[in-house]
Every structure is written in C-alpha cells, then in structure tokens.
Image (cartoon, rainbow, N blue to C red):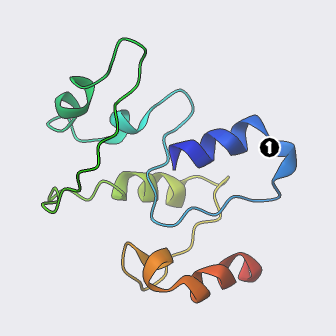
Amino acid sequence: MVVAGGAVDRMSGRFARAVYFDALVPRDGASVVDLLPDEYQPYFTSRITADGRIPLADEYATVKPTADLIESAARHARSTAAWDYKEIDAPHDYMITHPLRTAEVPRRI
C-alpha cells in the first residue's frame, strides 16, 4: 500500500478517506522495509539499485514467511486514535476472494 499511501499523502484534498485492507502501512518517513523483521531486511536492501528502486520480476514466491508482517501495522492502527480500525473475519486476500463485499466496506464506514 505504499504507492496508494503516497498518492493519498500527495493529493490528500482529493480523498475523503483511504481504506486499507490487511496492508503494510509505514509510518511517516518509513518504508515497507522498515516494517519487516530484521532477518528479512537484507533480502530487500541488497536488491536496491543505484537509483533507489527494487527491480520488479515476473516471479511469484509460493513459500511465504512465517512472520505476520501485517500485524505490526494492525497493532499501530488499533492503538492510534487517528485510525478508524475495524476487523473482519476474512482471509488476507479478501479484496480478491470477495470483491463485491469489499466494495461495500467504504459505504459502511
């Protein structure tokens, strides 16, 4: 959600509200890499190019880390008054597996 969050930050007057579904949301001045457990950071930082980008590839990793990388963002949202935090009983890819129900969420909040 870093791209979407950046757009909201840069054009905040055009958004009434941003809704994040089970997303990595870095705090101001942080990156997604900052949210990762220490043991995962070198994997990403070693791939940063001279212009500051991480190249994209057409590979998909089927083995996922055992750490819940989203939990730190959720914990922050739960404990910060600026966030209207809600939980839903759904899988991580809720927006893909339940697109119609996902579309209803902004209307309910």
Drawn side of residue 62 relative to residue 50, left or right: left
Snapshot quadrant of residue 43: top left
User: Looking at this rendering, what residue extends furthest in the top direction?
Assistant: 50
Snapshot quadrant of residue 18: bottom right
Numbered-mark total: 1
Drawn side of residue 3 relative to residue 35, left or right: right
Q: Residue at x 36, y 11 (%)?
A: 50
Drawn side of residue 45 relative to residue 95, left or right: left
The image shows residue 79 at horizontal and vertical percentages of: 52, 55
Snapshot quadrant of residue 51: top left
The image shows residue 74 at horizontal and vertical percentages of: 44, 59
Mark 1 nearby-residue class (10 Å; few <14, some 14–19, many ≥20): few
Q: Which residue is more in the foreground, 84 or 95? A: 95
Q: Residue at x 21, y 23 (%)?
A: 46
Q: Compared with residue 89, is residue 45 higher up or lower down, i.e. above or below?
A: above
Q: Quadrant of the C terminus?
A: bottom right
Q: Indicate the amino acid at tag 1.
A: Ser
Which residue corresponds to mark 1? 12
Q: Residue at x 16, y 55 (%)?
A: 65
Q: Compared with residue 54, is residue 107 higher up or lower down, i.e. above or below?
A: below
Indicate the secondary structure of the residue bearing disc 1. helix
The image shows residue 75 at horizontal and vertical percentages of: 42, 57
Q: Residue at x 51, y 50 (%)?
A: 1
User: Looking at this rendering, what residue extends furthest in the front direction?
Assistant: 58
The image shows residue 15 at horizontal and vertical percentages of: 81, 53
Drawn side of residue 86 relative to residue 47, left or right: right
